Amino acid sequence: MEGTTHFEVDVRDEVSVRRLFAEIRRENGRLDHLVNNAGTASMNHSLVTPVEVARRVLDTNVIGTFLFCREAAKLMRRHGCGRIVNLSTVAVPLKLAGEAIYAASKAAVEMLTAILARELAGFGITVNAVGPAPVETDLTRAVPKEKLEQLLARLAIPQMGTFEEVAHVVDFYLSPESRSVTGQVVYLGGA
């Protein structure tokens, strides 16, 4: 894609994240939008979830989101505006059994979103989140069909979500029309 620069970075590594944003500052001088969609999950009963798995999920989903929000906000505040969108999940309001550490990590992302919205509002930066219904990915393809059907049955609109539906919510959050919308979470599927 012309005009696009791609980076590969471990979102859990502060040094790498800071280096990435320093490069963005050098190359562009500013940052207008951040969509935090890096994440990982563990679908195990809490009694059989290894601590290494729990740490990886928390470090990726919570620490990674925090680091990207922090470094992005430093660039955004220089220009008095910016939009940050964090990805959550319907697993939070549904309190899904077998996803304790994953749902807890995304609940932390939602709290981070709410607090950053207040902390960054004075800089003209909005911070919101979207919690998609299950979307067909490698992760959801690995979920047993019966478990996925049970999850979908708990939604007001009991069907798989689409990337386009998620993108529409993200696009709204990034748009100038959403300048007074901050600290919000939109769950898709009617969770």
Image (cartoon, rainbow, N blue to C red):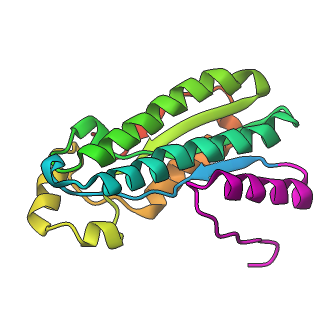
In this view, the residue in front, 149 or 120, is 120
Instruction: Residue 187: tell me if it is visible.
Output: no
In this view, the residue in front, 89 or 14, is 14
Instruction: Residue 78: tell me if it is visible.
Output: yes
Residue found at x 41% / y 47%: 58
Quadrant holding the N terminus: bottom right
Q: Which residues are magenta?
A: 1-30
Residue found at x 58% / y 56%: 11
Q: Residue 130: image x %, image y %?
A: 46, 44
Q: Is 84 positioned to the left or the right of 91 in the image?
A: right
Farthest residue to the front: give it: 51
Whether 111 is among the magenta residues is: no
Farthest residue to the left: give it: 146
In this view, the residue in front, 105 or 87, is 105
Q: Is residue 125 above or below residue 38?
A: above
Whether 20 is among the magenta residues is: yes
Quadrant holding the C terminus: top left
Q: Classify residue 77 by image quadrant.
A: top right
Residue found at x 77% / y 47%: 32
Instruction: Please state the total of marks drawn on the protein image.
Output: 0
Q: Residue 38: image x %, image y %?
A: 51, 58
Q: Classify residue 122 by image quadrant.
A: top right
Farthest residue to the bottom: give it: 1
Q: Is residue 153 above or below residue 181?
A: below
Q: Residue 182: image x %, image y %?
A: 59, 28
In this view, the residue in front, 114 or 171, is 114
Q: Residue 93: image x %, image y %?
A: 28, 35
